[in-house]
Image (tube, grey):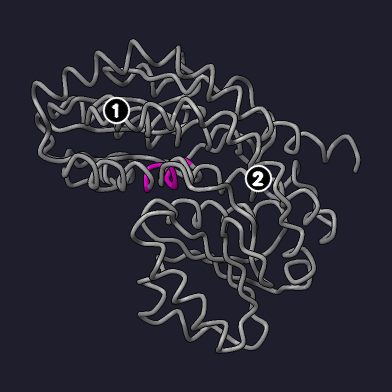
Amino acid sequence: MSDARRRMAAEFREAPEAVRRQGQILAGPLADLAARLQQKPPSVVVTCARGSSAHAATFGKHLIERYLGIPCADGAPNIASVYRRRLRLKDQLFLSISQSGRSDDLVESARLAGESGALTVALVNDTASPLAKASRIVLPLAAGDEHSVAATKTFVVSLAALLRLAVAWSGEAHFTRALERLPDRLAAAGDLDWSAALDPLARAGSLLALGRGPTLAIAREAALKFKETCDLPAEAFSSAEFQHGPVSLVAQHYPVLLFAPTDEAGKGLRELAADIHAKGAAVFITEHGGATPGTLPALAPDQPEADAICLIQSLYALLPPLAERRGTNVDQPRHLRKITITR
């Protein structure tokens, strides 16, 4: 593997230490924010993000709705940046997520949300960015520098930060212990062997990625990374939404990756895996201790949301060898730059 192809492979392995470092850096800001949210809870949370950060927002939606019972919606940035419409967000939480904090539509959305009376919070890696300046509260991702165009460790630390926010806000003590174990578990997840999927994916013309609950965000991020780094068209669906139409895509030997959650949603996903395997698909499902063909190894279950974060670390480890097989460069995706500016 050439030096140019090693950057992403090295950076995703920095995620465990970045998550460990983040805990100390975010402790104070999160405690202050959580106290404020507990004293005056919003009726709704609106997230605003693009790309991998939008998948992180999907993870945040799951956390906020499951553990806090507060509806969470993804905002459309063009409502602010193109149509100049201010949303009615007085006393609500407006949460922006970005690596660079430099996309004009996110900045404008945060600015207008603040003017409407929302509590604007930026979860951002560049704390001196325009998005940070446009937001009332800044939560640093603390990922450190990331040079690869395809985000890896910044996505992982975004998920970890959202889990920390859920911990601080909800007061769920068992999350804290799972977060303490997460860096070591991430390192172990990056060493799991997913090579069983290499041959089918190297030959594939496209694939499907499915998740549910905490793993829907993982499936969406995986699909993006297959497109970015391997020129492999991929679509992601909730396993429930998949059965409302997209299941018709399944054909003989068609690759389907299922990211199985370790909570109550896992049973349905495993049943779906068996069903589409019977339809002839090339099924790959994450599972701890599974020895059957099509099983991609996962760590022993710990805490469902932390388990989901570990799954994307294992997927990232698969991408460099897959890209090598498909003749693409994981660090120089076609037509992409590290910072994308949209309006």
State the SS at label 1: helix
Mark identifier at residue 183: none
Q: Position of residue 163 (x, y in %)?
A: 37, 34
Q: CA distance from mark 1 to mark 2?
A: 41 Å
Is residue 257 depicted above or below 229 in this figure?
Answer: below
Of mark 1 and mark 2, the one earlier in the sequence is 1
State the SS at label 2: loop
> Disc 2 residue type?
Leu
Please check the rendered image and state whether residue 257 is part of the magenta-colored stretch, yes or no. Answer: no
Is residue 156 depicted above or below 234 in this figure?
Answer: above
Residue range in magenta is 53-58
> Disc 1 residue type?
Ala
The residue under the point 18% across, 17% down is 35
Toward the viewer: 140 or 105? 140
Mark identifier at residue 173: 1
The residue under the point 71% across, 60% down is 231
Left or right, 327 with respect to 233, comes to right
Mark identifier at residue 336: 2
Q: Quadrant of residue 245?
A: bottom left
In the picture as drawn, the residue positioned furthest to the right comes out as: 2
Toward the viewer: 208 or 270? 270
Q: Quadrant of the N terminus?
A: top right
Q: Nearer the viewer, mark 1 or mark 2?
A: 1
Toward the viewer: 190 or 6? 190
Q: Position of residue 145 (x, y in %)?
A: 63, 21
Q: Main secondary structure of the magenta part?
A: helix
The residue under the point 47% across, 28% down is 102
